[in-house]
Image (cartoon, helix red, strand yellow):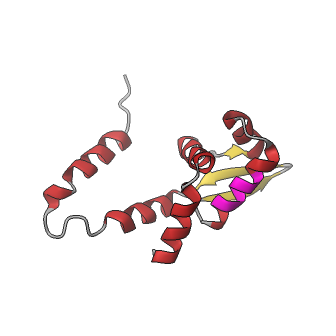
Amino acid sequence: MDKEITILALAALAQATRLDVFRLLVRHEPQGLPAGDIARELAVPHNTMSTHLAILTRAGLIEAERHSRSIIYRAQLDQLRELTLFLVKDCCQGRPELCAPLIADLTSCCSPKENA
């Protein structure tokens, strides 16, 4: 990932509604959500939501797929991974203990849930 793409992605996420949309779509992976459901869930007018979705799409953070009469939006987790790696790739500078807390936090939130 280069700096320009990173800046575009961060700029897209630097707005409260778009950040909420992206986080909502991450929670609904892999099935995604229709645009109308996203707007209702976040209590945002449909025309305003369309603008936010377009900005996130241009930034490569989400993708849209037509299903009959609905457009389903999904988070681009590969792009999220690339963005995260770009931001922290050089954090250790040969000292892995510097990134250990970050890795531990990510591991605990992303670990598979055990069947109870």
Where's residue 42, x and y in %? 67, 37
Q: Which residues are magenta?
A: 50-56
Residue at the image position 16 percent from the left and 60 percent from the top? 96
Q: Is residue 89 left or right of residue 57?
A: left
- The mark total stands at 0
- In the rendered image, the quadrant that contains the N terminus is bottom left
Is 5 located above or below residue 84 in the figure? below
Q: Is residue 2 visible?
A: no
Residue at the image position 66 percent from the left and 67 percent from the top? 58
Indicate yes or no whether the magenta region holds residue 54.
Answer: yes
The answer to which quarter of the image holds residue 62 is: bottom right
Where's residue 92, x and y in %? 20, 65
The answer to which quarter of the image holds residue 93 is: bottom left
Is 58 located above or below residue 21 in the figure? below
Determine the main secondary structure of the stretch shown in magenta: helix
Where's residue 107, x and y in %? 30, 45
Indicate yes or no whether the magenta region holds residue 57.
Answer: no
Residue at the extreme right: 69
Residue at the image position 63 percent from the left and 52 percent from the top? 74
Q: Is residue 35 left or right of residue 86?
A: right
The residue lying toward the viewer, choosing from 13 and 89, is 13
The residue lying toward the viewer, choosing from 49 and 109, is 49
Q: Is residue 6 visible?
A: yes
Residue at the extreme top: 116
- In the rendered image, the quadrant that contains the C terminus is top left
Residue at the image position 22 percent from the left and 56 percent from the top? 99
Is 43 located above or below residue 88 in the figure? above
